[in-house]
């Protein structure tokens, strides 16, 4: 199948009212888990990686594998770069062949976030690449000094002008989710999400998809989320499979972890309503 762009996949999700899963990957096993799960469900899917994962999986190894998997897939698969902070990494990503990228300016002032996002949008668009940006801040990620991002809700009143001034194509929103394992049950601000949805046309992205309830997914997708990012739950499924089979050798362990991650991805795609939509 031809390589899909994230924008094409999310346009269909928005038009038909379902969510699409985005999964970070670090190796062939995770790529296969995502693509095989999507094929079995006849679902679109988005795979990618993030700047923080670069030391584990450099672009020049991982991106060709993701692009090849996407081209071979029987369902629409897009290849996207998640949270990235550095200009150099973003330029490297454009050269590597990502169809879309995320610039995360949430650790900067709002003005700097707007200014840098706009600069990246101009370059990305000139190369036919879509840009995701974030307004507010989803908690849970840590910077290089180990400081954890705090939660700042997305202000619905500023969402339209943020998109207009930056030129971003996709908007990541902060409505009460967090990256990683939740320390307490998350309480999502669905009315805030609906207010944002009412003032912007761009596909909205929910980060921190691991650990949310089935109702959380149903409510956020109904409230206007088109893309749901998941990482931790897939990694934990792989880790559990290895822990439950301590006798397994490396090759068996790799296969067991892949099957467990595939089941985790299948469960999410099913919940997001994308099964049968490819
Ligand atoms: P989780 O690791 O909490 O699923 O978050 C994934 C994410 O939002 C990646 O951008």
Image: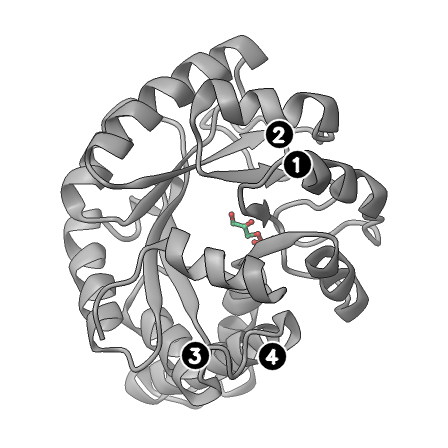
Q: Earlier in the sequence, mark 4 or mark 1?
A: 1
Residue on which the image places disc 2: 149
Q: Nearer the viewer, residue 140 or 212?
A: 212
Mark 2: is the Cβ under 8 angstroms from ligand 1?
Answer: no
Task: For residue 77, say whether it is visible.
Answer: yes
Q: Is residue 267 left or right of residue 213?
A: left
Q: Earlier in the sequence, mark 3 or mark 1?
A: 3
Q: How is the protein colored in the picture?
A: one colour
Residue on which the image places disc 4: 270
Residue on which the image places disc 1: 139
Q: Quadrant of residue 229?
A: bottom right
Label 4: element kind = helix
Residue on which the image places disc 3: 38
Residues at discs 4 and 1 in contact (Cβ within 8 Å): no
Residues at discs 2 and 3 in contact (Cβ within 8 Å): no
Residue 98's mark?
A: none
**Residue visible at 80% across and 38% down?**
192
């Amino acid at each position: 199948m031809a390589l899909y762009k994230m924008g094409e996949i999310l346009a269909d999700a928005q038009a038909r009212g379902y969510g699409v899963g985005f999964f970070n990957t670090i190796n062939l096993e995770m790529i296969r888990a995502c693509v095989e799960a999507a094929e079995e469900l006849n679902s679109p899917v988005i795979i990618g990686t993030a700047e923080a994962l670069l030391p584990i999986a450099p672009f020049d190894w991982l991106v060709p594998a993701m692009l090849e998997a996407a081209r071979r897939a029987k369902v629409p698969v897009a290849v996207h770069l998640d949270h990235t902070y550095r200009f150099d990494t973003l330029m490297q990503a454009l050269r590597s062949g990502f169809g879309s990228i995320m610039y995360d300016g949430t650790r900067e002032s709002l003005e700097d976030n707007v200014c840098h996002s706009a600069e990246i949008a101009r370059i990305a668009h000139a190369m036919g690449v879509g840009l995701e940006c974030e307004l507010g801040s989803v908690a849970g990620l840590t910077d290089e000094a180990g400081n954890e991002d705090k939660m700042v809700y997305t202000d619905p009143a500023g969402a339209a002008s943020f998109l207009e001034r930056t030129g971003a194509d996709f908007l990541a929103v902060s409505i009460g989710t967090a990256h990683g394992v939740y320390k307490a049950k998350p309480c999502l601000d669905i009315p805030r999400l609906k207010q944002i949805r009412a003032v912007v046309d761009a596909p909205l992205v929910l980060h921190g998809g691991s650990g949310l309830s089935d109702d959380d997914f149903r409510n956020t997708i109904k409230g206007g989320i088109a893309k749901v990012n998941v990482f931790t739950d897939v990694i934990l499924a792989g880790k559990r499979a290895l822990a439950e089979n301590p006798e397994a050798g490396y090759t068996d362990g790799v296969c067991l972890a892949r099957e467990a991650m595939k089941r985790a991805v299948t469960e999410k795609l099913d919940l997001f309503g994308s099964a049968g939509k490819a």
